[in-house]
Amino acid sequence: MSRDVTQLTDVLISHIGLTIPIDLNKIISYFSDIEIEYDANISKDGSIKLIKDKGYLIQIKNKELDIDNPKGYRDRFTIAHELGHLFLEHLADRDELFREGTSEEEYEANDFAANLLMPKAEFIECVYNNLDEEGLCNLDAVSDYFRVSISAVKTRGKFLGVFSW
């Protein structure tokens, strides 16, 4: 990978003073040129685009972001993914990106979102704190702790070597 995504997300978390669960609204507020719009009619789960003289607009397919509701956990990852495109400078030569496909940019944006929402050290600690007597992880507890989907927890755990493929 061409960038150190972990270092970038660590600096962002430290600079803004974020704690788990990561408050995406705090990131959006910190950077005055980023807005979120919820639109059930867009064709993809999410997108980010540059609007001249205004800044960046992240569009999310669902109606609202509720970090305390598991139904909103996937939207949190989508927003973090779109922020990844912005911070990784994927918009440098275009005005809009949609969340789709398997390009290197999409992989990097997913990696950014995973590192931002589930930092490695905290993730590993949380997994081990939620093991039962048989060594099985309570995925719901990890999902609720980070406010991400169970699918995101499984994928993060696999990439970190905590869960088997």
Image (spheres, rainbow, N blue to C red):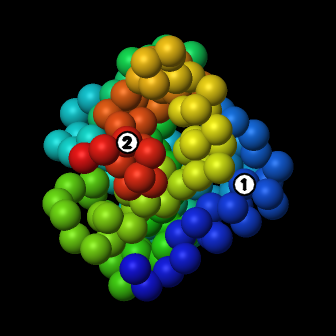
User: Residue drawn 58% across and 66% down?
Assistant: 6
Is tag 1's residue or tag 2's residue first in the polypeptide sequence? 1
- 105 over 124 or under it: above or below: below
Q: Is there a contact, CB below 8 Å, between mark 1 and mark 2?
A: no
Percent coordinates x, y for residue 119 in the rendering: 60, 50
Percent coordinates x, y for residue 77 in the rendering: 43, 41
The answer, for residue 127, to whether it is visible in the render is yes
Picture disc at residue 163: 2
Quadrant occupied by the N terminus: bottom left
Mark 1 falls on what kind of element?
helix
- 165 over 102 or under it: above or below: above
Percent coordinates x, y for residue 47 in the rendering: 33, 53
| Residue placed most toward the observer, 84 or 62 | 84
Relative placement, left or right, of 125 versus 53 is right
Picture disc at residue 13: 1
Q: Amino acid at mark 1?
A: Ile
User: Residue drawn 76% across and 45% down?
Assistant: 18
Q: Residues within 10 Å of mark 2 (few under 14, many from 20)?
A: some
For the residues carrying marks 1 and 2, which lies nearer the camera in this image?
2
User: Residue drawn 37% across and 28% down?
Assistant: 150
Q: Residues within 10 Å of mark 1 (few under 14, many from 20)?
A: some
User: Residue drawn 27% across and 57% down?
Assistant: 98
Relative placement, left or right, of 41 versus 86 is left
Mark 2 falls on what kind of element?
loop
The answer, for residue 75, to whether it is visible in the render is no
Q: Amino acid at mark 2?
A: Phe
- 3 over 7 or under it: above or below: below
Percent coordinates x, y for residue 149 in the rendering: 39, 29
| Residue placed most toward the observer, 78 or 120 | 120
